[in-house]
Image (spheres, helix red, strand yellow):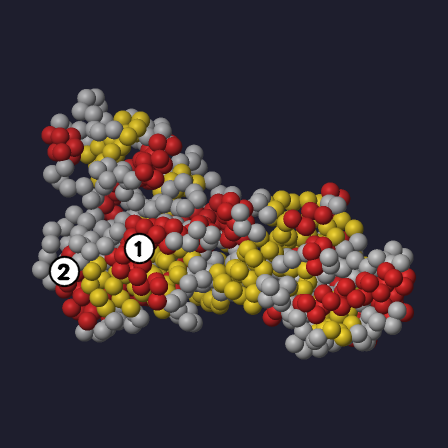
């Protein structure tokens, strides 16, 4: 149990973002915890019950303490009774301070980004196997909101809004930013800054501080201070790595290179930087090239619905700087309109920051303002929703105000009928509830795809797109075929697994595709969800030592050979010139120049179409000429390749690659094709047989049996898949009638089957 707290604790307002994690932590630490909340929703009720917390009204008998949310009024009957009886009554922050005394506290503080940074730090520490406790001020989508551990460290976000920041004595302090806020408590900016200065002064080991705050806060510390950002001791550089990933590098006092995160925008990059630096200070060994996939946190850039025509997002941003950061992250999407729905939080903040709010919202394409969410405040003149509307109207004529007597969801449902639109709810009020209701209504109106759109939303970023009626011809080397009903390029393993699981549940076919080099797409198109691993996330090249490398399934074979040559890995050269990506090559056990891809494979990881992640060594796989049985109903994620020589010279490897390239150029056509169209008959060559039969140059529509290589059908321009299929039928018929040979197609017929097509 926690020293200074009685065994029996009653949590009042237990459904709150900060109270629920604290109640769970106290129960895990050995206290008997009960809880109540006047507005406890079903989800939070289930979470509390899962962790053994009794949901009941306050019991007057017996010893115990009441811990309450800052939103609880001083006149609340439980507070009044407990205080009258002389029982301990603690605000959440005061209780957290007692919890923190028993640990080495990593205090995440600042005006904005505390929850995001805290969540990032937790994910990093989990990935590196650190033993620690944590207390969030919000909830993860997939992890508990708090954890009690016997380890020394506690990660927690420290709230300055109610003054309880004064009770903490951290081991490490992270100050993300400071912008004057909570005006009812801190009447001047100096008062506000002073609270953070005092926290820094109480810090025992190290402080991490945004470089722009150095002058105002840096002198408060008696311990080492690391300034982060432009002009600081640690400088950050970032670049986009695929549509939803950012690559970070640090220079200066800390040197770290190419840390990839599944977040975009400068504020997310800064938050992640502080998380990495704090993790290192706690002892995590972070090397260059790490890839971190952060778990979603509720109410932080959360997607509720993601379809080809409607996207619904929601974020807790309730300060002008936070709004700026979210709008910077979401960016523009060609052909889409963005509707921002904003609900200001507290009358006092709205009154003091009205002009700043109006300026931050001035560039919104469409702006919907709701009544202020008051929390525990009384209405203030100059701080109402109508007051903010008048300020916004001066800078933006595309704004409307919806009062509390009108349901905004009905208005927004009408709006989504007018073309591709993104709805973005901002604010600390009821935006999450509105976003959920809107997503439920949208899903109910689409019986085939609605639940898929909601499930994929749970793992979507601002850049995650799902497209309808997507042309497939330009995604194949043959350049023929119709459109996909739905098309998706996952940006992470979580997105891939979620897509597979929800489609399985909804009875929707999954159609994996690589770079389209060994298939012909049906003219009538493809039903179901086409999935393609073309995002950079799937193109990793990770050296494992001793001639071994882990290679992503989305990596192009040409890039694979180039990377291997660059680092001196010999033995992969025969793959050069095979079109396509590694996943497709593994699925077909493709080969060339006398070698097969499984000659150099040690193991593969793959996902079944049910969404189960599996791994198998080569000896446990069923593979042979042009097949790998396990991958016929699965999608490869990556594979470990083994080089026959790990210290080859780049020049020598390149010479071998060039030799193979020249052989291919001499023996294969240059026009669009799907590669070899038929499997080789036993003991013979399909190309030789077709040449002997005199079929080279045969034409149907825009398709032709190549005059260069008889086992290639080329697209001379304007070919259809029907043309290709007719040539396949023709070659099979002649080979059967004249030679008694049954030619079997090697390429896949995507969206149909050869059994059906060859009837």
Give the answer, above or below, for where 749 lies relative to 202: below
Mark 2 secondary-structure assignment: loop
**x and y percentages locating residue 84 in the rendered image:** 11, 30
Q: Which residue is mark 1?
A: 316
- Image quarter hosting the C terminus: bottom right
User: Which is more toward the observer, 389 or 323?
Assistant: 389
Mark 1 secondary-structure assignment: loop
| Residue 702 seen in the figure | yes
**x and y percentages locating residue 711 in the rendered image:** 80, 67
**x and y percentages locating residue 555 in the rendered image:** 64, 62
Q: Can you name the residue that lies furthest to the left here?
A: 381
- Image quarter hosting the N terminus: top left
Q: Earlier in the sequence, mark 1 or mark 2?
A: 1
Mark 1 to mark 2 CA distance (whole Å) = 19 Å
532 on left or right of 100: right
Residues marked 1 and 2 touching at CB (< 8 Å): no
User: Which is more toward the observer, 417 or 14?
Assistant: 417
Q: Which residue is mark 2?
A: 383
| Residue 547 seen in the figure | no
């Amino acid at each position: 149990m926690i020293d200074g707290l009685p065994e029996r604790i009653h949590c009042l307002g237990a459904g709150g973002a900060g109270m629920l994690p604290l109640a769970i932590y106290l129960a895990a630490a050995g206290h008997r915890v009960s809880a109540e909340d006047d507005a406890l929703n079903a989800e939070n009720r289930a979470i509390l019950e899962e962790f053994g917390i009794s949901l009941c009204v306050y019991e007057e008998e017996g010893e115990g303490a009441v811990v309450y949310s800052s939103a609880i009024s001083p006149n609340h009957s439980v507070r009044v009774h407990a205080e009258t009886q002389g029982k301990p009554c603690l605000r959440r922050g005061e209780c957290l301070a007692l919890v923190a005394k028993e640990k080495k506290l990593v205090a995440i503080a600042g005006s904005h980004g505390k929850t995001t940074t805290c969540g990032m730090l937790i994910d990093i520490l989990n990935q590196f196997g650190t033993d620690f406790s944590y207390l969030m001020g919000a909830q993860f989508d997939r992890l508990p909101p708090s954890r009690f551990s016997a380890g020394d460290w506690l990660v927690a976000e420290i709230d300055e809004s109610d003054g309880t920041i004064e009770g903490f004595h951290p081991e490490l302090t992270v100050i993300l930013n400071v912008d004057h806020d909570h005006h009812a408590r801190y009447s001047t900016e100096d008062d506000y800054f002073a609270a953070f200065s005092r926290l820094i002064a109480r810090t025992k080991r190290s402080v991490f501080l945004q470089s722009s705050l150095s002058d105002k806060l840096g002198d408060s510390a008696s311990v080492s201070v690391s300034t982060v950002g432009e002009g600081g001791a640690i400088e950050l550089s970032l670049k986009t790595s695929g549509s939803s990933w950012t690559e970070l590098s640090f220079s200066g006092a800390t040197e770290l290179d190419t840390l990839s995160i599944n977040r975009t925008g400068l504020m997310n990059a800064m938050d992640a930087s502080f998380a990495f630096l704090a993790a290192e200070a706690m002892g995590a060994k972070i090397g260059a090239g790490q890839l971190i996939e952060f778990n979603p946190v509720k109410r932080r850039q959360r997607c509720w619905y993601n379809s080809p025509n409607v996207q619904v997002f929601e974020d807790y941003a309730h300060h002008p700087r936070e709004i700026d950061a979210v709008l910077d992250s979401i960016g523009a999407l060609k052909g889409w309109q963005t509707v921002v729905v904003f609900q200001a939080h507290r009358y006092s903040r709205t009154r003091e920051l009205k002009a700043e709010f109006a300026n931050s919202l001035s560039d919104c394409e469409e702006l919907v303002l709701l009544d202020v969410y008051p929390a525990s405040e009384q209405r203030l003149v100059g701080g109402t929703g109508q007051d903010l509307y008048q300020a916004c109207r001066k800078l933006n004529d595309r704004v409307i105000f919806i009062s509390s007597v009108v349901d905004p969801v009905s208005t927004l449902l009408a709006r989504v009928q007018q073309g591709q639109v993104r709805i973005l709810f901002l604010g600390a009020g009821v935006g999450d509830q509105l976003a959920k209701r809107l997503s439920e209504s949208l899903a109910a109106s689409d019986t085939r795809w609605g639940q898929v759109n909601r499930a994929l939303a749970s793992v979507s970023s601002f850049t995650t797109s799902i497209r309808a009626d997507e042309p497939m011809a330009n995604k194949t080397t043959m350049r023929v075929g119709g459109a996909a009903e739905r098309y998706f390029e996952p940006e992470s393993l979580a997105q891939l697994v979620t897509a597979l699981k929800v489609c399985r549940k909804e009875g929707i076919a999954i159609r994996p595709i690589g770079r389209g080099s060994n298939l012909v797409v049906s003219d009538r198109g493809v039903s179901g969800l086409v999935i393609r691993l073309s995002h950079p996330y799937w193109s990793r090249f990770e050296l494992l030592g001793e001639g071994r490398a882990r290679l992503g399934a989305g990596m192009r074979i040409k890039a694979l050979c180039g990377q291997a040559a660059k680092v001196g890995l010999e033995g992969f050269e025969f793959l050069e010139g095979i079109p396509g990506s590694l996943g497709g090559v593994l699925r077909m056990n493709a080969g060339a120049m006398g070698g097969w891809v499984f000659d150099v494979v040690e193991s593969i990881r793959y996902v079944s179409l049910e969404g189960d992640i599996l791994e198998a060594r080569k000896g446990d796989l069923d593979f042979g000429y042009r097949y790998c049985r396990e991958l016929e109903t699965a999608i490869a994620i990556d594979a470990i390749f083994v080089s026959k020589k790990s210290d080859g010279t780049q020049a020598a490897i390149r010479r071998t690659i060039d030799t193979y390239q020249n052989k291919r150029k001499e023996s294969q056509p240059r026009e669009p094709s799907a590669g070899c169209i038929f499997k080789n008959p036993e003991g013979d060559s399909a190309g030789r047989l077709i040449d002997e039969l005199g079929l080279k140059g045969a034409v149907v529509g825009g398709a032709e049996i190549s005059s260069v290589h008889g086992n290639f059908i080329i697209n001379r321009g304007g070919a259809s898949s029907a043309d290709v299929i007719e040539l396949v039928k023709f070659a099979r018929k002649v080979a059967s009638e004249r030679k008694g040979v049954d030619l079997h197609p090697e390429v896949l017929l995507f969206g149909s089957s050869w059994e059906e097509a060859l009837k």
